[in-house]
Amino acid sequence: QVQLVESGGGLVQPGGSLRLSCAASGSDFSVNAMGWYRQAPAKQRELVAVFTSHGTRNYADAVKGRFTISRDEAKNMVYLQMKSLKPEDTAVYYCYADMTVGGWADEYWGQGTQVTVSS
């Protein structure tokens, strides 16, 4: 069984920074794409940043220049460094991965971590 586990959320003041981490664990799997989505109250889940299957990085326009996605492929981990946080960044942040497990490709989600930006 493969799972994604996030950490690093919390409460931060506007203009502050947070770093999220996500680890994929299990057996007989490989990561094709990995990144972050978020869902604010009463809104749809949206892409934040992702490493595509081609290794490129894609960012939502709302976070470009403020958020940076990075990864450690050897550890199957992905990180999201968030700077200059705004109240509108408040959301539950979900780790996402497209993984091949036992020969089958599928999408996997973490349990989510709350990020609250408020003074």
Image (cartoon, helix red, strand yellow):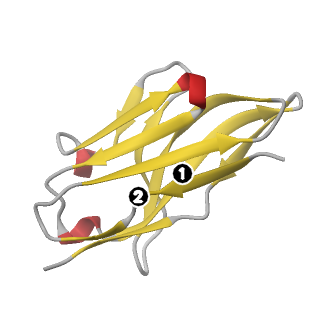
Question: Residue 107 location, x and y as percent?
Answer: 70, 45
Q: Nearer the viewer, residue 49 or 13?
A: 13
Rounded to the nearest whole Å, what is the CA distance between mark 2 and mark 1? 12 Å
**Residue furthest right as drawn:** 102
* Residue at numbered disc 1: 95
Q: Nearer the viewer, residue 17 or 48?
A: 17
Going 54% across and 36% down the picture, which residue do you hit? 77
Q: Of the residues tagged 2 and 1, which is closer to the observer?
A: 2
Question: Residue 69 location, x and y as percent?
Answer: 36, 37
Secondary structure under tag 2 reads loop
Q: Tell me the quadrant of the picture where the C terminus can be found.
A: bottom left
Placement of 118 over or under 52, stated as above or below = below
* Circle number at residue 33: none
**Residue furthest top as drawn:** 54
Residue type at mark 1 is Cys
* Residue at numbered disc 2: 8
Question: Residue 19 location, x and y as percent?
Answer: 33, 50
Placement of 92 over or under 70, stated as above or below = below
Please state if 33 lies on the left or on the right of 16 as rendered. right
Going 45% across and 30% down the picture, which residue do you hit? 71
Going 57% across and 47% down the picture, which residue do you hit? 96
